[in-house]
Amino acid sequence: MRSLATLLLLALPAATAGLPRLDLSNLLGTRTSTPSYERLLAQPVFQVTTPWGSPYMLFEKYKDEEKAIELEGSGAGKNEQDDVSKFSRVQSKDDMQDTRPISLYFVDEHDARALADEMKQMKHMKGGDLRITCTSLGKAVRQASHLGNGLPTGQPVDDTTGKMPSMDDGGSLRHKIVPSKRELFYAARCAGRERVGCFGDTAQEDADLLLQPQDVIEANKMGARRKATKNIAARAKKARQLEKEGLVESDVDRLRREYAHREGQVGLPVFYSGGLVKRPPALRRMIQGSKAWESSSLIPLYFSYEDLLNDWAEMRNRSANRAKIPESPPEVEVFDALDVVTSIDREQWKAERRAELVRERKGLVGKIPVVHNFIGKGASAAKSGLERVVFEPSRLGVQAKERIRARGSGKARLRPMRAWGKNA
C-alpha cells in the first residue's frame, strides 16, 4: 500500500491544475537547471508609485554632448535615427538639452524612500499620496531591457489614426534599474571593481566619490564618459606594447582594458568570496549538521556585502574545521549581475543546442525521451561552473518587502453588497 506522502505527490498535478505551480525543489536543495533570468526573481526592487501601483515618471536630462559620445562609441552614421532624437520630449535651441520620461526601479528601499521624500517637498506634490511598492528584479530586468520605444503604458490608441501615442504623450515609457548606493560603496573597495564602473586611481577614491550627493557623482561620471574613448585607445596601445616586449599585463590593467566600456557607467554589483558555498536549507542543516556546509556545491553571489560576511561567519562557526578558516573572507570579488545572468543564459543555450543536435543524430530514437535518455549517452561537455551559480537576495530588501506587504495599500477592496430584503 502506498504511503500517504506518495499519494499526495501523485495527486498534486491534478489538484493544482490551472493554479500556480508548487515548487518543492528548494526543500532539500536548489535546482541548477533554473533559467538564468528566473534566478533573479527572489531579489526585491522598489518603486515610488501611486496607491494603485502606477510609477511616478521622472524626466531624464539628455544633452547633445552625451549624444555625440554614444554615436561615436556605437559608430552610428548620420542617416541613422538614434533613440534620443526619436524620443526627446523638449528641445531648447539655447542650451540644446533634451528630457525624456523614465521610471526607476531601486534595488535599495532607502534610495526609493529618499526619492519619495524629495518629491514630497515639491509644491505640487505636497498633497500627493506617494507609496513605495515592491516587485521582483526579474520583472525590472524584463522591462528595462526594452530600449528604444520603451514599454506601452496602457494609453488607448488614437481613434482616428489607430496609432499608439508617442513617448512624449505618455504612450510608452522607459524603465531603468538603480543599483544600491550602499552596495556600490562596498563594491568600490573589492577586487574587480572595474566591472561595476569604478575606474579611480585607488579604491579609496572611488569609495569617497560614492559618499557624495547624487549630482556630484553624476558630474564625475560624465567627465569619465568624455574621456572613455581616449582611454580605450591608450590601454589597447599599452597592451600591444607589452606584448611586443614580452611582458605580462597586470591583472588591474587587463580588467580596465576588458571592461573599458564600463568607464563612466555604474553596474549592479554582486559579491563573491572563494570557499563560501550557498547556505544549506534549514531541513538539511537539521539532518546533516556541520556536514551540510561541506556537501553544498552551489556558488552564491550576494546582492549584499553584509550578507556575505554574515554567512561567512556562520559557515565558520558551524564548520568542523573552524580553526583552519579565517575569521573574515581573504578576498571578496565583485561582478556585474547582468553580465553574470547573460553568461548563464549563453551557456544554457549552448547546452540546449548540443542536446538538440544529439537527438537529431539519433533519428527516431532521439524523438522518444525515455529511449533517448537511456541509449547512446555520450560524454558530456566540459562545464564552466556557471550552472552552479545562485543569487542570494539582500536580507534588508526582503525585510522591507515583508513590511510593505504587511502594511498593505490602505485601500479597502469590498465587493458590492447584494440586494436583500424588500430590494431583493
Image (tube, rainbow, N blue to C red):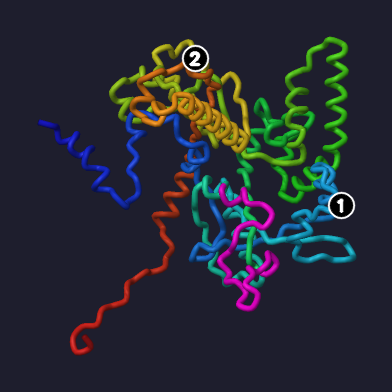
Q: Label 2 sits on what residue type?
A: Ile
Does the magenta-highlighted stretch encompass residue 85?
no
Answer with mark 1 or mark 2, whichever residue precedes in sequence. Answer: 1
Q: Which residue is drawn at the image coordinates 85% and 48% (left, top)?
A: 77
Q: Tell whether position 161 is magenta.
A: yes
Q: Which picture quadrant has residue 320?
A: top left
Q: Is residue 299 visible from the viewing direction of this image?
A: no
Q: Main secondary structure of the magenta part?
A: loop
In the image, 400 versus 66, the foreground residue is 66
Label number found at residue 325: 2
Q: In this view of the protein, which residue sits in the foreground, 305 or 139?
A: 139
Question: Regarding mark 1 in the picture, which secondary structure is present there?
Answer: loop
Nearest the camera: 197 or 410? 197
Image position, residue 159 (x, y; %): 60, 77
Q: Of the residues tagged 1 and 2, which is closer to the observer? A: 1
Please name the residue shown 72% across and 44% down the image.
212
Q: Measure the alpha-carbon separation of dots 1 and 2.
A: 59 Å
Image location (x, y in percent) of residue 196: 68, 35
Between residue 399 and residue 53, name the one nearer to us: 53
Circle 2 crowding by C-alpha within 10 Å: few under 14, some 14–19, many from 20: some
Q: From which residue to which does the magenta span run?
A: 142-169
- Mark 1 residue crowding within 10 angstroms, few (<14) / some (14–19) / many (20+): few
Q: Image height check: is 246 above or below 395?
A: above
Q: Position of residue 74 (x, y in %)?
A: 79, 43
Quick check: 81 above or below 359?
below
Q: Pointer 1: what residue? A: 78
